[in-house]
Image (tube, rainbow, N blue to C red):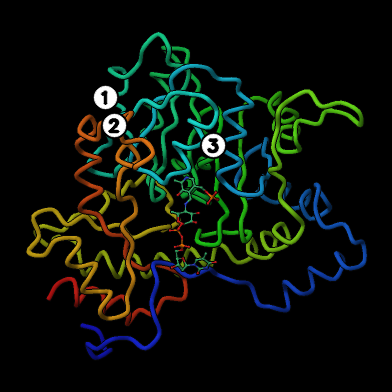
Amino acid sequence: MSRLSKKRLETPVAVTRSSLPPLEEYVDMLKPLWESAWLTNMGAYHEEFKEQLKRYMGVSNLELFVNGHMALELALQALELQGEVITTPFTFASTTHAIVRNGLEPVFCDIRSSDYTLDAGLLEKRITEKTCAIVPVHVYGNFCDVDQIGEIARRHGLMVIYDAAHAFGETLDGKGAGEFGDVSMFSFHATKVFHSIEGGAVAFRNDKLAGRLYELKNFGITGYERVEYVGANGKMNEFQAAMGLCNLRHVDQEIEKRQKLALRYRERLSGVPGIRLCAENPRVRSNYAYMPVVFDGYKKSRDQIFEQLAQYNIHARKYFYPCVNHYDCYRERFDERETPVAAQVSRQVLTLPLYADLEPDVVDLICDLVLE
Ligand code: T4K
């Protein structure tokens, strides 16, 4: 039971709140930028951030981007894919948009009800002679079945590009999230466990991709007087890299704080009939990115709980509702009924507030309201 009385909170509580380093730390980082006046286009902080991230993530190849979406979109372009790409509809708009904006055809595969990642058992049914790649999502930071997906991809000669937007800092059997598949994309958006205001990165296996990714994020320019590719502007600037460098110093404590709060939620909400929490994977070191709760046959519906929390000034989010294959822009092309588990979970799931500085009493209040 929360020590807070059950009345509307004065200050709104959102699903997340950006973590920030002490202001002086960031201001100190800005001084050299004023001296050099070098603000973007792969400056000193950009390079330092890249090197520190490689060490933290345990990967040997990494490229930085202005945001996670451009990272994914340009990574798909760099791989020169053509045809169909199997992916999940239970994700943020970015995953599918990146596929479609590359002229590729998304083919939706349903998800597992245990952790909402792509159901690898259904994957082969979706493979055709046009399939070139699989884009699974480590949704909420839940690891996909990387073993089975990797095995199927190898057998069919397909590329695997993980949308690891939610999985920064996570490991599976001690291996960093960036070490699986051919490519993994990470988001460093302000709403993420670790951020550089906006930002993103691509970790990749094939060394040869490095040059192409670098060129594509810089308009496809390959020399002073040469433009070989139709690239974009996907460059991370120095202010973003400086924020990333500051936040990297604190990210482990951030994750620890989140862990305590997530455990508090789990203690209160697990085992309650009609409430389903994500299955925990003992092989995974989690980053506690999100706190998704599925209301399946509970006395109150997801939407009722969403409204009830809002009355108390607590703003949970329906990540990810609707499913991508039910978006207005895709509805004519796809049928949500082809992915029934995703369709159902998206109508039942609510992501509850979770961020490092969230007060434990607010977690208790949220649980009281859900359970009353
Ligand atoms: N793949 C997946 C699976 C993703 O989830 C995402 C992004 C991507 C790819 C693409 O990565 P990026 O290109 O974004 O790097 C948010 C984020 O904008 C988005 O990054 C994220 N996924 C998605 C799940 O959530 P919104 O529209 O729900 O955010 P918004 O503005 O409503 O913010 C949510 C709450 O966060 C606010 O109520 C308060 C807090 N907040 C927000 C901002 C912007 C802060 O505390 N500080 C802030 O600066 O999309």
Indicate which disc, 3 or 1, sits on the residue closer to the N terminus.
1
- Residue in the picture at 48% in, 30% down: 100
Q: Is residue 305 above or below residue 280?
A: below
Q: Amino acid at mark 2?
A: Asp
For residue 207, what is the image quadrant?
Answer: top right
Q: CA distance from mark 1 to mark 2?
A: 6 Å
Give x and y (percent) for residue 148: 36, 25
- In the rendered structure, the answer to whether residue 216 lies left or right of residue 103 reads right
> Can you say which quadrant of the picture contains the C terminus?
bottom left
Would you name the residue on which mark 1 appears? 122
- Residue in the picture at 25% in, 58% down: 293
For residue 124, what is the image quadrant?
Answer: top left
- In the rendered structure, the answer to whether residue 210 lies left or right of residue 290 reads right
> Can you say which quadrant of the picture contains the N terminus?
bottom left
Indicate which disc, 3 or 2, sits on the residue closer to the N terminus.
2
- In the rendered structure, the answer to whether residue 149 lies left or right of residue 372 reads right
Give x and y (percent) for residue 83: 47, 16
Assess whether mark 1 and mark 3 are in contact (beta carbons under 8 angstroms).
no
Would you name the residue on which mark 3 appears? 184
Q: Amino acid at mark 1?
A: Leu
Q: Is residue 64 above or below residue 9?
A: above
Assess whether mark 2 and mark 1 are in contact (beta carbons under 8 angstroms).
yes
Q: Is residue 225 above or below residue 137?
A: above
> Mark 1 packing: few (<14 Cα in 10 Å), some, or many (20+)?
few
Give x and y (percent) for residue 46: 76, 51
Whether disc 1's CB lies below 8 Å from ligand 1 is answered no
Would you name the residue on which mark 2 appears? 119
Element type at mark 3: strand
Q: CA distance from mark 3 to mark 1?
A: 22 Å
